[in-house]
């Protein structure tokens, strides 16, 4: 599972070599929300957290 304590959304996105816009599109959220996650203003929850967990374990192609 995706652990926000160990890996940030920013690190995960960089690892996948995609922009905030592309990452947001795959997660079905706005670029603004991805930005807030990366700055720590908000925490991913619900379906977004589930998708981030999938990306963390299997890569972005798992949800593309």
Image: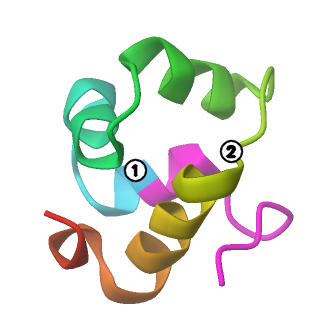
x then y, percent, for residue 18? 22, 44
Q: Residue at x 79, y 29 (%)?
A: 40
Residue density around tag 1, few if under 14, some if 14–19, many if 20 or more, within 10 Å: many
Reply above or below: 33 against 53.
Answer: above
Q: Which quadrant of the structure image shows residue 28?
A: top left
Where 60 sits versus 56, above or below?
Answer: above
Q: Which residue in the protein does label 1 denote?
A: 13
Furthest-top residue in this view: 32
Which quadrant of the view contains residue 22? top left
In this image, 10 relative to 2: left or right? left
Q: In the picture shown, does residue 51 fall above or below 13?
A: below
Element class at badge 1: helix
Quarter of the image for the N terminus: give it. bottom right
In the picture provided, is 51 more to the left or to the right than 44?
A: left
Dominant secondary structure of the residues highlighted in magenta in the image = loop
Q: Residue at x 76, y 72 (%)?
A: 3
Give the magenta part as a residue range. Answer: 1-12
């Amino acid at each position: 599972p995706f652990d926000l304590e160990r890996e940030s959304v920013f690190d995960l996105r960089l690892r996948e070599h995609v922009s905030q816009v592309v990452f947001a599109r795959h997660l079905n959220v706005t670029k603004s929300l991805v930005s807030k996650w990366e700055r720590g203003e908000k925490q991913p929850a619900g379906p977004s957290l589930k998708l981030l967990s999938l990306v963390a374990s299997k890569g972005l192609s798992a949800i593309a």
